Amino acid sequence: MNIVELVNNKSLKAMEKRIQIIEILLEDNLSLQELITICDSLKDKQIAIILEAIEEITNKKMKQLDPAYIDFVEKYILSDNNSCKREASRIVGNLAEQYPNKLDSVIQCLIKNTTDDSTVVRWGSAYALSRIIVLTEYANTDLYDQISDICEKEQNNGVKNQYVKALKKAVKIRK
């Protein structure tokens, strides 16, 4: 079964679909360009399942993904779908340490989502930004001050704690 058939299969639950998509992506039989083409033909809810699979691969470090995956997920950070926004942000957070030189344009998308009405979207952005700010390349930049300001304004403790922990780590790098 291919990815399009999987995401359209109504007899499978989302978790089952995600597991099978992970297997397909780990097999290396699908190029990133093919994946992009597939996603261009799908609805946001279906894309979110694919992004969840990619997030799990990056989170558990099941496979070294190409840095072009950051470019691929960037457009989903500003999607209309909150699940796409959240998962794309988490993927960036998981890949940040491996590809610090690929983050400049995606950082602006993440910052934009820090004011989103949805807590899960703000949390996803906090997750990614918190992993970026502790990188040597970013700890001593204006991004530190931006994240400090965002942290002060954030009302949700779960989101705020992401920033607080990262800012404490970044302070040590800044010295």
Image: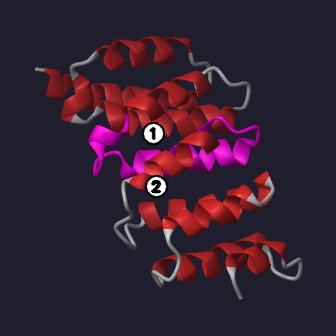
In the depicted structure, whether residue 98 falls above or below residue 80:
below
Q: Which picture quadrant has residue 93?
A: top left
Q: Residue 53 location, x and y as percent?
A: 58, 67
Is residue 119 among what the camera can see? yes
Q: Would you name the residue on which mark 2 appears? A: 69
Mark toward the start of the polypeptide (1 vs 2) = 2
Q: Which picture quadrant has residue 129?
A: top left
Q: Residue 65 location, x and y as percent?
A: 39, 64
Q: Would you name the residue on which mark 1 appears? A: 128
Magenta segment, which residues? 77-103
Q: Which class describes the residues within 10 Å of circle 2: few (<14), some (14-19), or many (20+)?
A: some
Looking at the image, the residue that sits furthest to the right is 10
Q: Is 43 displayed left or right of 122 in the figure?
A: right
In the depicted structure, whether residue 71 falls above or below residue 165:
below
Query: Residue at the location (35% across, 19% down)?
Result: 143
Query: Residue at the location (57% across, 28% down)?
Result: 157
Query: Tag 1's secondary structure?
Result: helix
Q: Amino acid at mark 2?
A: Tyr
Is residue 162 among what the camera can see? no
Looking at the image, the residue that sits furthest to the left is 175
Q: Residue 145 location, x and y as percent?
A: 35, 12
Give the prevailing secondary structure in the magenta stretch.
helix
